[in-house]
Amino acid sequence: MAEQPVRARLVDVAREAGVSKATVSKVLNGRQDLSVRPETRQRVHEVAAALGYRPHSGARALAGASTHALALLVPALNNPTYVTISRGAYQRARELGYLSLLAEDFDGQEADDTFNDLVKEGRVDGLLIASARPNHPLLETLSRNPVPHVFLNRAVKGSGRNVTMDVARSSVTALDHLHGLGHRVIGHIAGPSGITPSEDRSDAFLRHSASLGLVAAPVASGDFTEEGGAAAARELLTPAEGEPQVTALYTSSLAQAIGAMRAIHERGLRIPEDISLVGNDDLPVAGYLTPPLTTVAMPLHELGTAAVDALVAEIRGESPGDVVVPTEPRLVLRGSTAGPGAGGAG
Amino acid sequence: MAEQPVRARLVDVAREAGVSKATVSKVLNGRQDLSVRPETRQRVHEVAAALGYRPHSGARALAGASTHALALLVPALNNPTYVTISRGAYQRARELGYLSLLAEDFDGQEADDTFNDLVKEGRVDGLLIASARPNHPLLETLSRNPVPHVFLNRAVKGSGRNVTMDVARSSVTALDHLHGLGHRVIGHIAGPSGITPSEDRSDAFLRHSASLGLVAAPVASGDFTEEGGAAAARELLTPAEGEPQVTALYTSSLAQAIGAMRAIHERGLRIPEDISLVGNDDLPVAGYLTPPLTTVAMPLHELGTAAVDALVAEIRGESPGDVVVPTEPRLVLRGSTAGPGAGGAG
DNA sequence: AGTCGTTGGTCAACCGGTTTCCTTGGATGG
DNA sequence: CCATCCAAGGAAACCGGTTGACCAACGACT
């Protein structure tokens, strides 16, 4: 009989603590504009805890306060990158008293459905958008229906509310590693054009290749999937007339690297003896491929936490700004890289 | 000026359509207990559409109606299996007028946090639980705070509300394939004990091995991860004194298969010449491994849709019951299986 | 002694829907 | 010609919080 199977309401806590609803509300929300005796405050907290009281989010939202919920919109959940980001966001949101919901943005019409379900129906106070791209319908919807939001990973130029990582640095790190091993013809498998982290990585790749004085630095782009990586790798492994053969590849995502491995094997080439391979994003599966994949670990978890910090600040009234996660990309050395011609194949 | 940047409310629709709030509410919810002229009904619908009206979910929930939202609790989102299930659930929920939220259940204390955030705060009408296991704290919480729910994939025996797939059949399918190729010593990498689909698959494996008269059918269990699969594979590849060497392995998850590939390669063995390998769950990455992995495709998407059907039925007042998704597991042949000794290694 | 400022709260309106019970005007029946 | 009934819709209470306005009691000050 100690348990109440029914939801305890604010009024129940109030009655039990011998105070009014208003007092309970203010005490539990930690409001300053009310003076209460410490003992009263304590009693309210105790009763609330004893009753397992949880405010009804709908009632709260209705009364003008916030829903204490955010939503993270990601382009593809089967890309484990976003799972890591999401965990960072969830955790930080919780620390700040928010609930972070996860929604997959299937692009096109569906994005508006999601927007309607979450924002127009008043379920969340703000959006963490990781699925932006040029001409995304969501961008227009946002301009018509303003709601706090930040863009993470995929930036929207000029929005002044981008939370990103130093992806240019990841290209530099990968190139320095390969160049240090002796590679002089390095190909890059980029993501789709128009997507900022993909373009930034690609630009940095070209810039740094030039400054290292590489013989050639061909780039091919493809989706962030295994298939996209395989197709781009096939392209790069077949040099144009008079062009040198690449001895190393650097991909924009982990899935692309897996696809590239497949394409390299199809050509009868070995990794790393014939071709060295470096991927972006360090996730557990990288260590279990054959050979284990050398990657550039990006601070995905921090990206999630930083994005939440930025969004909550905006919700609390501060004006947004661009943020770059300070943690630098880090090279994780495994078995997919070696000096060129290490296999001495003839 | 055609657009209203502010949320349209029920009363706005009512004013614009020249009727009362009550009428709009009833019309939009398609209630029978009210007679309205077809032209009025039509006008209400038109005005609502023109204003982009969306009912405030909180207000709705408060007024005693439902939130029109469900939550799917999964154990690990980096297991892409759950992503596919989630998509099925999301889509079907939408067809039924619900929003399906996705939450990762990090086990232990966190599960109760999630329950509080979603159920006690009144954000959802019911739970789709894919993260059950014996002694999970959520089970006790559920018994104290009843809320509509179903268990999917991982069943809770005796709950009478399990939505599952025919996992026993997947073992039979895999075994028949390997047996047909001539294998007589087949090992199984099972999931953790206590988790139903893992145990069911394992039981079926042992039963069917016996009925096929296999020489040996060793089983090792490990987490559903690459690491778990690698460790279990190492164990199975090292036969006990006097036991025969396995020529084929069948794993309970795709990640385990990837880990097993690693362990097999570490031993200097080739796939499929020395060891054949069959994994469960067909996801894109399987086709891009080297060699491409033969898998048993499970009806994950349908599992998601079936679970939503069952939960919504329960929310609408029907009594729950166990459901098995009718679609049968299907073998997807790729390059990781061949007859034993196909490589003629000495 | 009267006034004023604090401390420690309370009151009641309001948020945006849903639902139950009424009302109204015209058609129908006796 | 009056009572009845039905179709069509309206009025208002209510859900569970939040919030600004208000108030009582008490000590300090003049």
Image: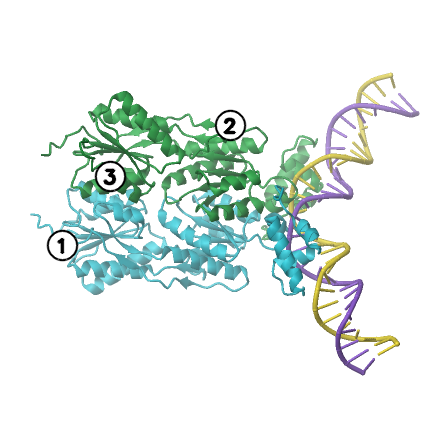
Chain colours: A green, B cyan, C purple, D yellow
Residue type (three-letter) at the residue carrying disc 1: Pro
**What residue do we see at 51% from left, 48% from top?**
A113
SS at mark 2 in the image: loop
Tag 2 residue: A321
Which label is found at residue B340? 1
Chain letter of mark 1 equals B
Tag 3 residue: A235
Q: Earlier in the sequence, mark 3 or mark 2?
A: 3
SS at mark 1 in the image: loop
Residue type (three-letter) at the residue carrying disc 3: Glu
Q: Nearer the viewer, residue A122 or B41?
A: B41
Q: Could you classify mark 3 by the number of other residues whose Cα lies within 10 Å: few (under 14), some (14-19), or many (20 or more)?
A: some
Q: Nearer the viewer, residue A162 or B324?
A: A162
What is the distance, in whole Å, between disc 2 and disc 1 at their CAs?
A: 62 Å
Which label is found at residue B246? none
**What residue do we see at 65% from left, 39% from top?**
A44
Residue type (three-letter) at the residue carrying disc 2: Gly
Would residue B91 be seen by someone viewing this image from the given angle?
yes
What is the distance, in whole Å, between disc 1 and disc 3 at their CAs?
A: 36 Å
Residue B325: give x, y in percent of width and height: 38, 62
Query: Splitting the image into 4 quarters, where does residue A315 fall?
Result: top right
Point out the residue furthest to the left here.
B346
